Image (cartoon, grey):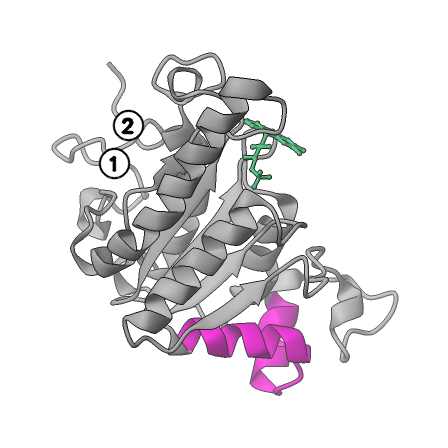
Amino acid sequence: MLVVLAHPETGSFNGHWADASADAAAREGHRVLRSDLCAMSFDAVESADHYAQHVSGELFDPLKAQQSHADSRLLPGVIQREIEKVRSADWLIFHFPLWWFAPPAVLKGWFDRVFVHGLLHTVEQRFDHGLCKGKKALFCVTTGATDAECAFNGKEGDVQMLLWPSAYTLRYLGFTVLTHKLVHGVHGYFEGCEQQQLESRLSTVLQQQAGLIKGFDTRDTLQFNTDSHFDAHGTLKKESPGLSSFIRHNR
Ligand SMILES: Cc1cc2nc3c(=O)[nH]c(=O)nc-3n(C[C@H](O)[C@H](O)[C@H](O)COP(=O)(O)O)c2cc1C
């Protein structure tokens, strides 16, 4: 299992939650790999500077640079190592807080740089034919906002929709994505009784993480349209189901 943490503070709830996942997986006999992106000072910004063969002044095409450097085995060491971790793990678990209605930038940058064109996806090998087919991924996410605010019609936006682009990134690569594990109302501004209630709620989440890891293989999965649901233009066929607010039929 690969445990990815996108939080700058290992002593945060997210940090402890990632540790709980890693510990539980190890106790279950899994080989546990970790990517603590901030502790690694992972550079989330894709740029020409990462590519040894890029000629200064020439147009930088990220997909082509990724592919050519993968072909010539000249990807940066950190990217090669992250790719190896993704390849060797059957299960991936991502721990992160919601920041500005999205995962922290370091995780988006990890997707941008690690999901290398030519190694983890190609034009022919994506979606139903994705190279990560058979692997499972889970997002464990905290929000400062409450359950109601993060729900359908909630003031902070439906968190299922906010996480859809990230989940779909994994679906693009072929992953099966499990239903998200969400913990709401996590922030440092509670006092007194409310703070005690939060601490007790969070400690329950940590205690229950072993059960979540045990049930990883049987956890419900997110539903995505299959390739056959689209016509030759890539448009959802009339008879295909609209499974998300992002790919839907006109009412
Ligand atoms: C830059 C930043 C942006 C944030 N944006 C959101 C947000 O869009 N929605 C939300 O519910 N909480 C937001 N929060 C609150 C965090 O989600 C919350 O502090 C975090 O989940 C707490 O987990 P931690 O104790 O592990 O840091 C934001 C926090 C920061 C620092």
Residue pointed to by mark 2:
248
76 drawn magenta: yes
From the top left corner, tell me how far across and down residue 46 is, in percent.
70, 59
Numbered marks: total = 2
Determine the main secondary structure of the stretch shown in magenta. helix
Q: Which of pointers 2 and 1 lies earlier in the amino acid sequence?
A: 1
| Amino acid type, mark 2 | Arg
Query: In the image shown, does 216 or 109 lie closer to the viewer?
Result: 216
250 drawn magenta: no
Left or right position of 251 against 170 = left
- Name the residue at 37% across, 42% down: 205
Q: Quadrant of residue 64?
A: bottom right
Query: In the image shown, does 192 or 45 lie closer to the viewer?
Result: 192
Residue pointed to by mark 1:
236
In 3D space, how far apart are the residues under numbered discs 2 and 1 (Cα atoms)? Answer: 7 Å
> From this viewpoint, which residue is outermost toward the bottom?
72
> From this viewpoint, which residue is outermost toward the right?
57
Quarter of the N terminus within the rendering: bottom left
Q: Label 2: how many residues lie within 10 Å, few (<14), some (14-19) or many (20+)?
A: some
- Name the residue at 38% across, 36% down: 182
Q: Which mark is residue 177?
A: none
Ligand 1 appears in which quadrant?
Answer: top right
**Disc 2 and disc 1 in contact, CB within 8 angstroms:** yes
| Amino acid type, mark 1 | Leu
Q: Which residues are magenta?
A: 64-87
Callout 1: CB less than 8 Å from ligand 1: no
Whether residue 117 can be seen here: no
